[in-house]
Image (cartoon, grey):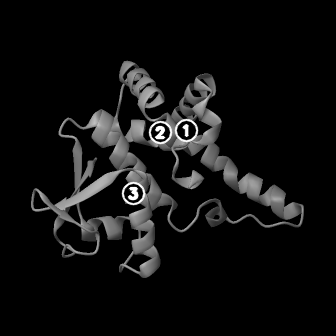
């Protein structure tokens, strides 16, 4: 379950996605530290300094991402010179981007969006993260995320649903319960 916990990078991505300013970012991080500590990666739960420092590091990285990304081929070449191989895809598991979606839903619902919910079509969610159909392993992972982040799904306003119930083009509303 540690992979479902918020990392400093996850929070930086949420902050960048919400286009928060400096004061808003500081207030957001204070609220996350105060209210979401059980959802933080273990190394941050008792260390506010590292939590804020690492999140700010990733915010800086994301603001100038092209510069470090340009260095990746040099790193890759150096590793090949050592007789090893580096695969960019090996840094992520199959559901890493999808996990980030659920982290973002919780954070945006609680701290950023005024309406307290996030809406998305099931088809859009699937396409955005590269899935073409609901496989049993994907459904299991979706339920794990929904439970871990304490989310409830709704269709047509107030009708509770499960992820596989709505039609692909129906809008699903995610709310924190």
- SS under mark 1: helix
> In the rendered structure, are the residues bearing label 2 and label 1 in contact, judged by CB atoms less than 8 Å apart?
yes
Report x, y in % for residue 105.
33, 48
- SS under mark 2: helix
Camera-side mark, 2 or 3: 3
53 lies left or right of 155: right
Where 80 sits versus 15, above or below? below
Where 150 sits versus 31, above or below? below
List the single residue furthest toward the right.
82
Q: Residue at x 35, y 45 (%)?
A: 106
Report x, y in % for residue 130.
41, 71
Q: Which residue is mark 3?
A: 147
Where 15 sits versus 117, above or below? above
Q: What crowding class fits label 3: few (fewer than 14 Cα within 10 Å), some (14-19), or many (20 or more)?
A: few
Task: Tell me which numbered mark, 2 or 3, is placed earlier along the sequence.
Answer: 2
> In the rendered structure, are the residues bearing label 3 and label 1 in contact, judged by CB atoms less than 8 Å apart?
no
Q: CA distance from mark 2 to mark 3?
A: 20 Å
Q: Which residue is mark 2?
A: 11
Task: Tell me which numbered mark, 3 or 1, is placed earlier along the sequence.
Answer: 1
83 lies left or right of 6: right
Where 70 sits versus 61, above or below? below
Q: What crowding class fits label 1: few (fewer than 14 Cα within 10 Å), some (14-19), or many (20 or more)?
A: many
Please tell me in which quadrant of the rendered image residue 52 appears: top right
Q: Residue at x 36, y 41 (%)?
A: 107
Please tell me in which quadrant of the rendered image residue 114 appears: top left
- SS under mark 3: helix
Camera-side mark, 3 or 1: 3
Q: What crowding class fits label 2: few (fewer than 14 Cα within 10 Å), some (14-19), or many (20 or more)?
A: many
The dot on residue 8 is: 1
Q: CA distance from mark 2 to mark 1?
A: 5 Å
The dot on residue 92 is: none
149 lies left or right of 63: left
């Amino acid at each position: 379950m540690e992979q479902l916990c918020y990392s400093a990078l996850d929070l930086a991505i949420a902050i960048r996605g919400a286009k928060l300013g400096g004061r808003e970012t500081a207030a957001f991080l204070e609220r996350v530290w105060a209210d979401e500590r059980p959802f933080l990666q273990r190394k941050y739960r008792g260390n506010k300094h590292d939590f804020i420092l690492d999140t700010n590091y990733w915010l800086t990285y994301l603001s100038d991402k092209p510069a470090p990304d340009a260095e990746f081929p040099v790193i890759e070449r150096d590793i090949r010179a050592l007789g090893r191989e580096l695969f960019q895809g090996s840094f992520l598991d199959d559901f890493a981007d999808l996990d980030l979606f659920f982290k973002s839903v919780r954070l945006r619902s609680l701290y950023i969006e005024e309406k307290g919910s996030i809406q998305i079509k099931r088809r859009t969610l699937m396409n955005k993260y590269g899935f073409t159909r609901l496989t049993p392993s994907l459904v299991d992972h979706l339920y794990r995320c929904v439970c871990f982040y304490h989310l409830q799904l709704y269709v047509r306003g107030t009708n509770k649903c499960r992820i596989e119930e709505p039609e692909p083009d129906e809008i699903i509303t995610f709310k924190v319960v």
